[in-house]
Amino acid sequence: QMPRGNLETIHHRALVLAQIRKWLDRLLFKEAFECMRKLRINLNLLYDHNPKAFLDNVDLFIKQIGSVNYINLFLTEIKEEDVTKTMYPTHALSTMQSSEGAKAKKVDIVCDAVRAAMEKWDPQKFCLSILTSYVRRTIPQLEIALQKVHELRESPSTTIVSADEALKYLLFLVDVNELYDHSLGTYDFDLVVMVAEKSQKDPKEYLPFLNKLKKMETNYQRYTIDKHLKRYKKALSNLSKCGPDYFTEFLSFVKDQSLYTEALELYPHGTVEYKAINAAYGDHLVSKQQYELAGLIYARCNSIEKALDAFIASGNWHQVMCMASQLEYSGEKIAALARTVAGKLVEQRKQADAAVLLEQYAEDYEEAILLLLEGAHWEEALRLIYKYIRLDILETNLKPALLDAQRNHMILFDNQKTTFTRHKERLSVVREMKEKARLGLLDEDVTGCAEADLFSDTSSIMTASDASGKYSQSNSRISSRSSKNRRKAERKKHSLKEGSPLEDLALLEALAETIQMADKLRGDVHNLLKVLILFEYDARAKELQQNFDDLLLLFETSIPEIWPPSVQQNTAAPILGPHSTANSISISYQHQRNVNISMQDSELFTAPKLNKNIQWKLSLLL
Amino acid sequence: QMPRGNLETIHHRALVLAQIRKWLDRLLFKEAFECMRKLRINLNLLYDHNPKAFLDNVDLFIKQIGSVNYINLFLTEIKEEDVTKTMYPTHALSTMQSSEGAKAKKVDIVCDAVRAAMEKWDPQKFCLSILTSYVRRTIPQLEIALQKVHELRESPSTTIVSADEALKYLLFLVDVNELYDHSLGTYDFDLVVMVAEKSQKDPKEYLPFLNKLKKMETNYQRYTIDKHLKRYKKALSNLSKCGPDYFTEFLSFVKDQSLYTEALELYPHGTVEYKAINAAYGDHLVSKQQYELAGLIYARCNSIEKALDAFIASGNWHQVMCMASQLEYSGEKIAALARTVAGKLVEQRKQADAAVLLEQYAEDYEEAILLLLEGAHWEEALRLIYKYIRLDILETNLKPALLDAQRNHMILFDNQKTTFTRHKERLSVVREMKEKARLGLLDEDVTGCAEADLFSDTSSIMTASDASGKYSQSNSRISSRSSKNRRKAERKKHSLKEGSPLEDLALLEALAETIQMADKLRGDVHNLLKVLILFEYDARAKELQQNFDDLLLLFETSIPEIWPPSVQQNTAAPILGPHSTANSISISYQHQRNVNISMQDSELFTAPKLNKNIQWKLSLLL
């Protein structure tokens, strides 16, 4: 009797499922299968109910079910889904077991286990089911299936199923073109023809192609097939086996398909071919503007000139000089090269590297020293001054540069202090307004107007000199940092404009940036202080130390104010209080969490860390 | 009629205070004062009630009060405390005004204002009150007060109060020894004798001292007095004025009191004295083991040999070579020095610096290259190899060092992966146990036993070679880092021992450290990969890149697991739910906050940041 209504069906099904589970627990697969088939219960349950029991008793399963059609039905229905979790959930019990075998795919496990059982029991009888088990794998093993069909054709007498039947069945399961491609992929022309004949392909179309292939040398034939099937890596490997005559074709194939690294693996190091591939790879990398890697690749294949150019383009000056040495450049040529590269390095504010080039390859000591001063590398500049006995530079350049640097730092600290204080004050205004708004004491439109002119000139913060000529003596450390900062500013997510909805976040961001920027200067200031002391600029040093110390102290004392624990944990105190209810707390709490998570700005709520362990002060100046 | 009971007094006082406020509002100071004096109400109220009104009408206050005694009473009772906030609080109203003048001290403001009024009105009459106003300042101006007494003595005819009376009054206010010291400090012997006579000091004691002082040259006399009063800085300044004959005494005084920086300010740069002070300062700094500063100071005063030694001790090799150049050392001596300093630098794992010394001063190119290899400075090593045409080193040392480095990194990554996974798994066990304990499902004593042997061998994490001889070729970058890590480990606050109460924090700490350590290796690995590629060790490079990538991926995917949002915000989700009440939420919320704040470990709850923007991978190896 069929169920008559929804409720009854559900009820009925629950009872049925219970019965099926009992059968499965007692390994009565046949009963379970028949019932499931009749009541259209998903066959995955056969496995999912207890995967281990199924796999341990798969032979029993095959014997009980017996029917090729039934097994095909089972195999085609099997899916990754665990129906005990989705369609037919039960209570906790089975979850522990099923999560273990999560590494291999369930479909593959079942197909392989069932196939093994069938092969053991009666490969002839289950022939079609075995084919199904190959096709149903997550990555269908069509070549093996085709091979099986081919075997049937070889020995037709011993089989129950004919090759023809089997092939028809395969074509029922798999698209004909896919099967044809895979048959080609076996490089077995008998198979190809067999599949082609069954398909509706025009023999005038495929026969000429097959005949052309048949005439080829085996490796080249395989390469042609692989290329046809777009299996380029396999094609490459086969082509490499065709011998040196085909290397030109090989190389152009590598270039077409950008298979350089794969190609390199096919030839031993040191061979002509290996070098040729490297050269082509180098050209490719240059065209992709991967100059450094290109340089390394060129160097490997002894294309030293090309390597040198690539290293110049990538800015790797160490390698540039290595290449120049290998090319046995004359002293003059080396010097010119060193000057060129040094110029590029200075543009990237790498004065210390540029100075090494000028000193060691161009032997231009004065220029090297001036670059070091420009980069605020005081002690290295001093070392060269004394090494090359150029004490005149102490007066003409070093001392002026030193005083410039002191002045620039003073201006920078002053600007940072002003900006910081302004942002900090504005932050407390914004927070107060937001708090008032939250408490409903303020109309929304008033927000932000009160302090409308507080931020009229924040954009003019960085006044440190930008105009630093290529080799000018202006001390460039600071402006380098400031330009970095400007770039950073462009990335900003939130607007500092007063009244903007996330102004408080923008302020937090700006404050953290100011702190981090100044905090990074500890080492630079320390080095500057030492040299100021050495040249008896005690008063200037004292002033500098005092100002920087004041700035850091301002930051340190402001941090608990800007990032109070409630902000850091992103949980404002006023949530809780004598008048709060479970609901009010829950709501404001959830609200805060959502705001936070949606903005992905949690970093802003963490106070920046000061590098207090760096001892930058000189006791002399305390 | 006097109040009879507590309650009545209080009630009565409230009414009285209201009346006094009314009087003060109408500037009736006299009435208010009389009443306050009678009922022992703190006289600070006269000012605190309305500071601005008091200061604007201080002349009126003096005129109304009129009495020297009353004014003295007022001045002696005046304190920093604001009695409108502490003793006699009223409602909000006055708070806004009083907070403004917070910069200067209230006591000083009142003393100065009252004194000015008295000086204007009748300095003779208010003589003693004027003295009181000097004495009562936060830093008593005893010298001025004494000067006033001295003036009385000079012109006794015109005064109401005699010098004698005034002095007696001062001695009543101030300790006699303090007054005596201050009289000495004015360098005015008349004043000193005047005070001494009033004191109970023995003339046989102070007269010889005074006579001795009188015979001295003025500056030396002042120095002697300052020294006697322990005003060393003033003493130093006076002694410096005594001329070159006293410089020996000056210098020994500087040494005794460690007043080097003060002493330097007293002599112009370039003078003999300035240099002598610097030399002494240098010695002092050496004795305090501040070698670098000592070196700078010695260099300033041309003690170049001493400077050189100090710079060697401090490890500042740049300055060492500067000093050596100034001393015009022979090539041989320079080479030996360079070798010595290089040895020290290698001990500090600064192979790159040591290599510069060996290359440029000892001209030992081979040793320089070997050091660079030891420090994993591959490209700099290559540069020197080609610069000095020592291509033999490529085979003998560079390639083996390269392969060593690759191997060491592989071992390191493997160890880090093992440790990390172990700690991560243990953390989830500990968290689960804590959660169960929190829910009361587990007895406390069970905690930690279940996994007792999980951590038996955590101490053997770092196996990277420690045995790196001074100039050995073993690649030392890694072991340098590991020794740093070991030092870090010693600082650990929490125990990793299983079952320890803060084991979860210890695990978080250890996990964060592993992540940060590996994250810092991006640059090193990138450099190593490049050179491996250059020498065609593609397979090794690929292996290295793969392993490091896997490690970083493990960290990246584990971070949200180890630091889920609930941990990062330190607010676990289960607080809120359908069954929570305002109280339950409040309590668990407060509890969590307290736990967090008390432990000062909030950093541990923040996931470490990975430097994902560093492009360390080579596309060649992908």
Image: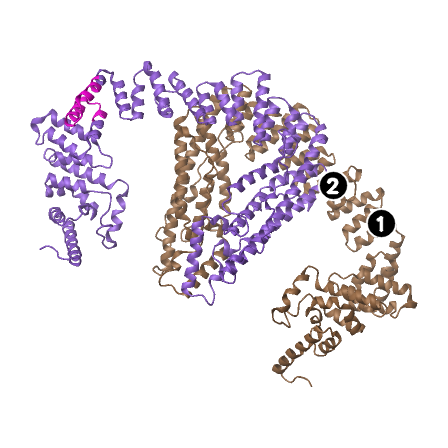
Chain colours: A purple, B brown
Which amino acid does the dot numbered 2 rest on? Ala
Q: Chain of mark 1?
A: B
Are dots 2 and 1 on a single chain?
yes
Please give left or right for residue A552 compared with residue A314 in the image.
right
| Local SS, label 2 | helix
Q: Which residue is mark 2?
A: B280
Percent x, y of residue B166: 84, 68
Q: Which residue is mark 1?
A: B220
Please give left or right for residue A10 compared with residue A432 in the image.
left
Q: Earlier in the sequence, mark 2 or mark 1?
A: 1
> Which residue shows up at 24% across the image and 43% down it?
A80
Percent x, y of residue A480: 59, 36
Along the line of sight, the residue nearer the viewer: B116 or B569: B116
* Quadrant where the image shows the N terminus of chain A: bottom left
Asked if the residues shown at circle 2 and circle 1 are in contact, with their CB atoms under 8 angstroms apart, the answer is no
* Camera sees residue A611: no
Q: Where is residue B171, by image quadrant?
A: bottom right
| Local SS, label 1 | helix
**Overall secondary structure of the magenta section:** helix
Please give left or right for residue A267 compared with residue A105 in the image.
right
Callout 1 environment at 10 Å: few (<14), some (14 to 19), or many (20+)? some
Relative vertical location of residue A321 with respect to residue B69 in this rendering, above or below: above
Along the line of sight, the residue nearer the viewer: B394 or A526: A526
Spatial separation of the CA atoms under disc 2 and disc 1 = 22 Å
Q: Chain of mark 2?
A: B
Residue A331 within the magenta-colored segment of the rendering: no
Which amino acid does the dot numbered 1 rest on? Tyr
Percent x, y of residue A305: 49, 18
* Camera sees residue B616: yes
Q: Which residue is most to the right?
A: B157
The magenta span reads A183-211
Q: Where is residue A298, by image quadrant?
A: top left
